[in-house]
Amino acid sequence: MLPIAVDAMGGDNAPGAIVDGARQAAAQLDVPVVLVGRPEDLEGRRGDLDVLPASEVIGMADPGSSVRTRKDSSLVRAAEAVRDGKASAMVSAGNTGATMASALLRMGRVKGVARPAIATPIPVPGSTPTVMLDAGANAECQPPWLVQFAQMGAVFARERYGIAEPRVGLLSIGEESSKGNPLVKDTYALLTGPGALARAGARFVGNVEGRDIMTDDVDVVVTDGFTGNVALKTLEGGMRTLIRSVLDALGATPVADEAVGALMPLYATFDPDQTGGAMLLGVDGVCIISHGSSSATAIVNAVRVAKEMVEAEVVDRLRSAVAPA
Amino acid sequence: MLPIAVDAMGGDNAPGAIVDGARQAAAQLDVPVVLVGRPEDLEGRRGDLDVLPASEVIGMADPGSSVRTRKDSSLVRAAEAVRDGKASAMVSAGNTGATMASALLRMGRVKGVARPAIATPIPVPGSTPTVMLDAGANAECQPPWLVQFAQMGAVFARERYGIAEPRVGLLSIGEESSKGNPLVKDTYALLTGPGALARAGARFVGNVEGRDIMTDDVDVVVTDGFTGNVALKTLEGGMRTLIRSVLDALGATPVADEAVGALMPLYATFDPDQTGGAMLLGVDGVCIISHGSSSATAIVNAVRVAKEMVEAEVVDRLRSAVAPA
């Protein structure tokens, strides 16, 4: 396998935790990894890993359009490496907008795909995660794009979680087809049309509501990038608040050690470092987006997912599953 | 005070739990309560409470438009009682769409209000709840409506939670004014315009993200009814899953009693029966919407909020705070 290109400069904990994670991944996963970034920042940390030099860095708060001017940035160079057949995939914990932009500009889109979408796994205790897309790539969407998100999300759910015939739900505010905004109503009509998900080997289960996301009633939840991003961040914020409150309350009891210990498996289920990151679906290459505060463990898991997606030839499978919009 | 009209037929646990709650509210809160519903279903349960007869019932799954044909339904009669000066407020745990429709049709809108909105309090541990609106009344919105939601939400946050100068945030997918969909960008421009929230005595703090809702960084979160409903239900579903998982994990330990006991105050914070329900803002009368699975306790709290909102003359305060759209 070609090496997986890890953006060493991206993320709140870059380059330290990113490089540590990349090294651990290379050692544990039997996969070649190449770091992309400023050689002077990586020397002394990189161990045995090769470095693909990139002199510029795009910061977490910079606009996505920075990729047009910073052509020697680690993000742009990582995407170029995939395009040029020097890397099999890219992984970044950096600026999400710039990651999407560099992947889109350098790798291009899979033929027929109108818009790439971010597919984010949402943990479900006792079951496989629910894949939600778009989690933020496209604030405004058109109905045919959402149909493609459904097709791509189904392929991703099958290849990543082994779900034979993924159940796809459309996020709305009621189960009836009459509920929702015009985008949802028009998409509903398209998804119930003949063969909408046939090539993707998936099944449309109708509208789902926010309360269904974290259940095993649905495998793929399709929505526009505005709603998806709001839902994702609302859930993250709520979970964080609740977990902190639970730990505070238990910490004040004489049984703190035992009680908190019993919650550790649950904590791991909800730990974003364990999910392995989101995938940008629809670009012509594997691009894994890890969250900004990624630890070394998060990078190991992101590289693991990148490797699995390369081995599963997920981009080729998307190519066959997506009908032109 | 005129009696508060409680829709005795609405909700998953109607009429039993609803009538019990109404009786408890009358006894505990020093407020007159009148039940609205089928006399034959309420006889033997109603205790000392008067009944305003209504022969029809709108079920939880019926369309909101049912109010046009079922004119002798408990929901329509409750709204009429407010309009006709026979009741000071209405409370229902029934069909939300039909509750909105009956309030809108019978009470009418406050002059100048383009669209009523559902204001839902979201619990924040250690702080006052965050008021989110619109939580589902209007799946599609226009920017001037959202400005009015901001004005109305601010008045509600002040009168209900005593927040002198509520901080209003616009729900988006990034803090920068350039982030979001066209609705959000246009609303942002209006809310930063001179005097947008002056009459409401509130302060616009810019865009907020989903993760800010359950924090004390913002008092009022403004959004369209589609996004608001998705966010609310996503949060409810996530909380339910997490709480159940925590209780399951602790229940299997030898310290279950002590650990679960320590979480009870937290459980109460997140218990929807404790929040007192949502308020439909912008109709010309007090209309409190309690959740469908309301217990007697939920109805007591909803009646309490109705009483407080009548006493605070919140409808008149909305009238002065809202600038015509």
Image: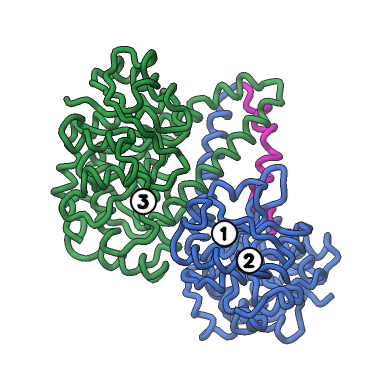
Chain colours: A blue, B green
> Would you say the residues marked 2 and 1 are in contact, meaning their CB atoms lie under 8 Å apart?
yes
Which amino acid, mark 3?
Ala
Element type where label 3 sits in the image: loop
Whole-percent x and y of residue A205?
63, 56
Is A172 situated above or below A285? above
Give residue B137's mark.
Answer: 3
Q: Chain of mark 1?
A: A
Dominant secondary structure of the magenta stretch?
Answer: helix
Discs 2 and 1 lie in a common subunit: yes
Is A133 situated above or below A314? above
Which residue does the numbered mark 2 point to in the structure image? A150
Image position of B235 (left or right of A307): left
Which amino acid, mark 2?
Ala
Element type where label 2 sits in the image: helix
Discs 3 and 2 lie in a common subunit: no
How far apart are labels 2 and 1 at the CA level? 9 Å
Is B303 situated above or below A138? above
At x 43% / y 36%, what residue is drawn?
B291
> What range is drawn magenta here?
A254-276
Which residue does the numbered mark 1 point to in the structure image? A170
At x 36% / y 67%, what residue is drawn?
B183
Q: Chain of mark 2?
A: A
